[in-house]
Amino acid sequence: MRYKLSAPATLHTTIQLPASKSISNRALILHALAQGHIAPSNLSDCDDTRVMIKALDGNPGHIDILAAGTAMRFLTAYLSVTPGTRIITGTERMQQRPIRILVDALRELGAQIEYAGKEGFPPLRITGTELTGEEISLAGNVSSQYISALLMIGPILKNGLRLNLTGEIISRPYINLTLQLMKEFGADAAWSSESSITVRPGKYRDIPFTVESDWSGASYWYQMVALIQDNEKKESTKTEIKLPGLLPRSYQGDSRGAEIFAKLGVHTTYTDQGVVLTKMGTPVTCLKEDLVDIPDLAQTFVVTCCLMNIPFRFTGLQSLKIKETDRIQALITELNKLGYVVKSEQDSILIWNGERCEPASHPVIATYEDHRMAMAFAPAILRTPSIRIADPQVVSKSYPGYWEDLKQVGFGIEIEE
């Protein structure tokens, strides 16, 4: 199945974003480790969170997390300290995503984990036990989800945990998000130096907790505001999108997206209810950004800049190759269909210098089982006369209501089998 899209003439609406997947999944693990009875509220209604809830509900002996990378990593650590033996697996793509770094770290702490298939990859057979190790070192440029998975079980370890990160530390905001949530649930965890984190042994508290709206999901609405052409002569057609539930001092690192979109002509007004997006100012003529702390916004900015004809150089993208797909190659391939020649360097940099090629007459954007490919390319219809999105259902991973929200603001969506 694929969707054929058509663009609205104006954007003037209020959108209720989904709750943050990143916060939801961390809160669920912390709630489970607290053996709590007060369930977190306003949880994300997405695939990743649903499989997490199912896995934690009674801890079944065989856990299939489908394509949920966050769930795979967090649950691997959680099951290591939870009594019982379980097998955790996922989709074919998930079984191709490496997990050796996390498994080795957990084994160093005393975890009993075996590979049930290919060495270094899921599925895993995990027998929960008391972990007595207390200090490990990891390269700082590994996925922050590995680091967060280890930190969250830190208070449960007999002697706590000291985690030393070596070299460049990527995605620091996600680590800080985890630490902040751990503290809310009662943990004593903090940076003890620029590159070390200390987690004291102790117990989590059972607390009421409400999840805030998702800044990652907000990025696609910022993208639409950047891409739509305002009719400056008519006040009634001026672009304005209200996004309730977003906090100005959010725990979410992706809130930095608002600062970058300001360079692309999108103004953010913070209110007591959330944020209001409008067009203001002149976009930059070239954009250079280090996205190491916000890799999930890379697709959004790459697509937006190409369609706005703004050359760019984005660095810090080394984690993109082990996401739902190889996002670097996927972006290069799909933007070529729209007539843009994007190049990569060192498997961590994406560059567009304005080079164009002949676009496909009726481009069909492949989504590679990656929700962010679908959501980042759909707004391209605002600048491209014809575009189709293949396998659009992938958005259920993080934003199940995405297509309905697009219809609400006037996007046309025609189903093609």
Image (cartoon, rainbow, N blue to C red):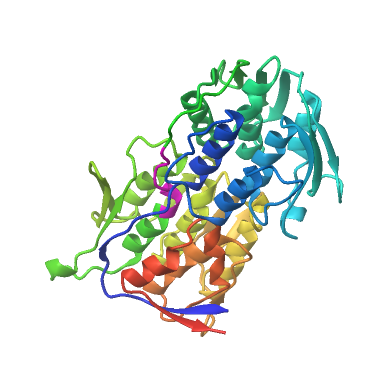
- Pick whichever, 165 or 332, lies toward us: 165
Q: Quadrant of the N terminus?
A: bottom right
- Pick whichever, 337 or 268, lies toward us: 268
Q: Which residue is drawn at 48% across and 50% down?
A: 44
Numbered range of the magenta stretch: 210-217
> Where in the figure is residue 211, as x and y percent of width and height?
43, 41
Q: Is residue 335 above or below residue 348?
A: below
Q: In which quarter of the image is residue 187?
A: top right
Q: Which residue is drawn at 60% across and 20% down?
A: 197
152 in the magenta segment? no
Q: Is residue 383 visible?
A: no
Q: Is the magenta stretch mostly helix, strand or loop?
A: loop
Q: Residue at x 39, y 37 (%)?
A: 250
Q: Which residue is drawn at 75% across and 37% down?
A: 101
Left or right of 331? Residue 113 is right
> Where in the figure is residue 324, as x and y percent of width and height?
64, 56
Left or right of 180? Residue 336 is right
